[in-house]
Image (cartoon, rainbow, N blue to C red):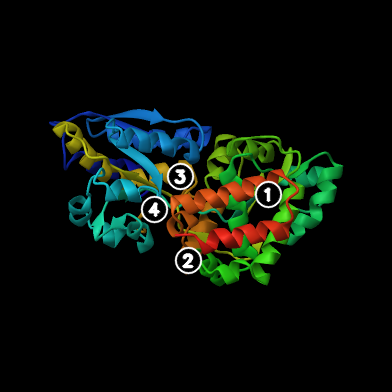
Amino acid sequence: MKLRLLAAALAATVVLPFGIANAADLEVTHWWTSGGEAAAVAELAKAFDATGNKWVDGAIAGSGGTARPIMVSRITGGDPMGATQFNHGRQAEELVQSGLMRDLTDIATKESWKDIVKPSSLLDSCTIDGKIYCAPVNIHSWQWLWLSNAAFKTAGVDVPKNWDEFVAAAPALEKAGIVPLAVGGQPWQSAGAFDVLMVAIAGKDVFNKVFGDKDEEAAAGPEIAKVFKAADDARKMSKGSNVQDWNQATNLVITGKAGGQIMGDWAQGEFQLAGQKAGTDYTCLPGLGVNEIISTGGDAFYFPLLKDEEKSKAQEVLASTLLNPATQVAFNLKKGSLPVRGDVDLAAANDCMKKGLEILAKGNVIQGTDQLLSADSQKQKEDLFSEFFASSMTPEDAQKRFAEIIASAD
């Protein structure tokens, strides 16, 4: 059965369990505002609207760092939305512990989420004290280098196959008036790039030791020193980016004004929207072409406790809809992410998505830092790398501060 027909057939199953007797408008907040993200979130809205309820879009411009404080403030201030996006991990931990978020365990049990959500760490990140508080919608991996084939053709050099070749090609790119590495000014971008460099250069075990075990000695050690040397190279290569948002940096790659970008697989949505084809117009290197490992972070929706009975029932419908097979296919094909269900047909996936699926199938995965670090520790890390990329701080001084952050991390 073709993917389109499969999606249509499965879409009907979203409506059947609930009907429209308790239809309600439900405000959903998120930070998906780039062109590719907007196209993806429209698929979620369409699927939910098909149940007879109405998705009231509460998009908040900017990154998650901008949106999350607004979301949290509304929930704690007594003005909760119907549902809200957070990343997989610990971002909603305090809200759950304060009794402000809805327990989804009954829905998850009824629909066998533990059997269908893969890897299990995604649902584990939704679980606090044995109860499930969120519905995961995708697997987003950070560990990608996106390259403009046109930029390297202009510079007269081959498209790199790994990070070292990319660094070696930087002078040729610069000579051709092309920024080697596009990095936006938002703190999470530089911090995320460092995490990607760590997995590629220091490896999975060191990454887990630093962020999982909070090992200060490892953070201060020689393997991480190599990572800071690579981060210094990245900093030099990114001079001249002069953009703020991540999708603006992606656009530099799409238009051939930059050679590459270290960014999560959500960048695929922007390439797709621009009509570019993976393997022809752009190249993707998982694990920077060094270590083909991806993180299993991503996005999940949490549901604040509501007093309105009809809206509460609509929350149940939305939670179910997000995990519906058809919704998973339609949303993730537009978003560039991988589905959280291992039983859906992604025959229409592009070359880069297929690479991610192969790595996932092999089990070459790590948890994202949002899953391993508290929001406070993550913020400290972001502040450090924002300053590092914007200043002349030495790699040695930056590593010392990084080790101190890890030593006090929770």
Q: CA distance from mark 3 to mark 2?
A: 31 Å
Nearer-N-terminus badge (3/2): 2
Q: Nearer the viewer, mark 1 or mark 3?
A: 1
* Residue 108, image x, y percentages: 23, 53
Q: On the rendered structure, is 54 left or right of 298?
A: left
Q: Nearer the viewer, mark 2 or mark 1?
A: 1
Q: Which mark is residue 333?
A: 3
Tag 3: amino acid: Leu
Is residue 285 depicted above or below 183 in this figure? below
Could you say whether the residue bearing mark 2 is in a helix, strand or loop? helix
Q: What residue lies at 39% left-to-right and 53% top-to-bottom?
A: 90
Between the C-alphas of marks 1 and 4, the distance is 25 Å
Within 10 Å of disc 2 (Cα), the crowding (few <14, some 14-19, many 20+) is some
Q: Which residue is mark 1?
A: 388
Q: Name the residue beneath numbered marker 4.
A: 90
What's under tag 4, amino acid-wise?
A: Arg
Please provide percent x and percent y for residue 158. 78, 54
Q: Residues within 10 Å of mark 3 (few under 14, many from 20)?
A: many
Q: Is residue 129 above or below residue 60?
A: below
Task: Name the residue: 45% across, 45% down.
Answer: 333
| Mark closer to the observer (3, 2) | 2
Q: Which mark is residue 212?
A: 2
What amino acid is at disc 1? Phe
Where residue 394 appears, x then y in whole percent? Answer: 74, 55
For this orientation, the residue located farthest to the right is 175
- Which is closer to the viewer, label 3 or label 4? 4
- 12 and 395: which is toward the camera: 395
Q: Quadrant of residue 222?
A: bottom right
Asked whether the beta carbons under mark 4 and mark 2 sit within 8 Å of each other, the answer is no
